[in-house]
Image: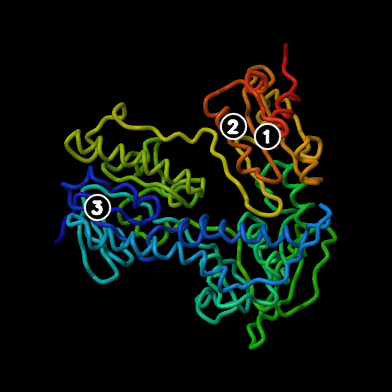
Amino acid sequence: MTHYDLLVIGTGSGNSIVDEHFDGMSVAIAESGLFGGTCLNVGCIPTKMFVHTADLAAAAADSGAFGITTRFEGADWPAIRDRVFGRIDPIESSGRQYRTHELPNVTVYPEHVRFTGPKSFAADSGQVFTADRVVIAAGSRPMLPEIPGIDAERIDSPGYPVVTNDTVMRLDSLPRTMTIVGGGFIAAEFAHVFSALGVDVTVLVRGTGLLTALDETVTERFTRAFTTHHRTHLGAQIRSAEVTAGGVRLAFASSGRVADAAIPADTTTDLVLLATGRVPNVDRLGLDTAGIDVVDGRVAVDEHQRVLSGGTPLPGVFALGDISSPYLLKHVANHEARIVRSNLLADIRAGGPGAAGDSALAVTNHRAVPAAVFSRPQLAHVGATEAELRAAGIDATVAIQEYGDVAYGWALEDGTGFVKLIADRRTRQLLGAHIMGDEASMIIQPLIQAMAFELPADRMARDQYWIHPALPEAVENALLGLDFAD
């Protein structure tokens, strides 16, 4: 039986772990899909390249408020798609080539691999092997709701008019109509992309609003802004579907979550996009054979990213990213990968799997984890919501600054953007920041920094210059609006 010093399952952030420090070790890498994982191939990077194109299209269509005349006259979808994947596909290919053919100590298994014991494995090809150390970085996949009439086995297959984010960006042509199922960030971003490019988009949301996991002010105001640009049905779901030669015939029903919800009439759509979230790939790894703990649908890990078995670290076994983290975010997975690499090397220096004591191991930092939604309008947030702080009994001060009340907001003709900040009235520490509007993902960064390094909000506001009349003045004014105890 073949034996390896290290096995890495998954080539998203897990692929970054194996560097020159592992040159003297035998390493196996297992990847049944595309090298680079979700972010590179079907997530963050391609979607944001499409979003930028959509932003340009939307700006062209909306120029009248600025006294100029421009128009959106159509999209060359193949050119848009090929610009994106003409950059991404070579990166995927070169990563696979490098790992497979250019590193003599690395063996790539381009197939699914599962546990058969704590440190024994089998590949779909029938190959079996063992490893002293293991990194589980197997990622996540689209969550597929059960809808009568839709064949779950055919979703994302060529020619089948029901897709997920895994394939929707590689369509041969733009559909005339699209129905998007979901009210989270995937649904919000793709609604913006395809509607801006000329597709007649309908969004079905089972609940009372979009992005309901965010701060209540953000949810309410984003839902209001989103529904002015996109045909949206709240409290509605698909009752049944029939795939026909002309597309997908849909019948709708109330979800029961919205009183007096307006349920749309039966219709036929060219394409259905299922955008109902993602689920960790825990059920595909044979984790039970290894005695690995699964909590809330994720591989259980400790603060050092060590995998737990019966609540105790399994020596030499680590996990990171979507498979184990409550944050399905690339920047979090990258941080966790750095922690895992550090702790693997600490184990190696200590002489064996699990030999390094806790004091020698790096600790994961999940303080002030930010996220953004690149829709229309854009969102960014970090820290707690107002409701969470109220429930915790924290004496918080809240300030909201409208984009439209600062000079650059006038330039943007912005009537919806805002900055909402929440801080501890006594300690003056920022506890949450929520921004909706242009460049939200950029102007939130100093707030992330302040939270990460515990800079008091009043010092942040007054002890530095803020460029006038730049958009970050909205952040400055929100900071100044916080009411602290004397």
Q: Is residue 335 left or right of residue 253?
A: left
Q: Could you say whether the residue bearing mark 1 is in a helix, strand or loop?
A: loop
Q: Distance from label 2 to label 3 (Cα)?
A: 44 Å
Q: Is residue 120 left or right of residue 454?
A: left
Residue 174 vs residue 128, the one in the foreground: 174
Q: Could you say whether the residue bearing mark 2 is in a helix, strand or loop?
A: helix
Task: In the rendered view, tell whether residue 466 sits above or below residue 186.
Answer: above
On the image, numbered disc 2 is attached to which residue? Answer: 446
Closer to the chain start, of discs 3 and 1, is 3
On the image, numbered disc 1 is attached to which residue? Answer: 472
On the image, numbered disc 3 is attached to which residue? Answer: 119
Q: Could you tell me if the residues under marks 2 and 1 are in contact, i.e. CB atoms within 8 Å? A: yes
Closer to the chain start, of discs 2 and 1, is 2
Residue 171 spot, x, y in % from top left:
56, 74
* Circle nearer the viewer, 3 or 1: 1
* Circle nearer the viewer, 2 or 1: 1
Residue 88 spot, x, y in % from top left:
45, 62
Which image quarter: residue 163?
Answer: bottom right
Hey, what amino acid is under mark 3?
Answer: Lys
Tell me what residue is drawn at x 55 percent, y 34 percent. 368
Which image quarter: residue 37?
Answer: bottom left
Residue 58 vs residue 338, the one in the foreground: 58
Q: Distance from label 3 to label 1 (Cα)?
A: 51 Å
Q: Could you say whether the residue bearing mark 3 is in a helix, strand or loop?
A: loop
Tell me what residue is drawn at x 80 percent, y 41 percent. 410
Q: Could you tell me if the residues under marks 2 and 3 are in contact, i.e. CB atoms within 8 Å? A: no
Tell me what residue is drawn at x 39 percent, y 60 percent. 91
* Circle nearer the viewer, 2 or 3: 2
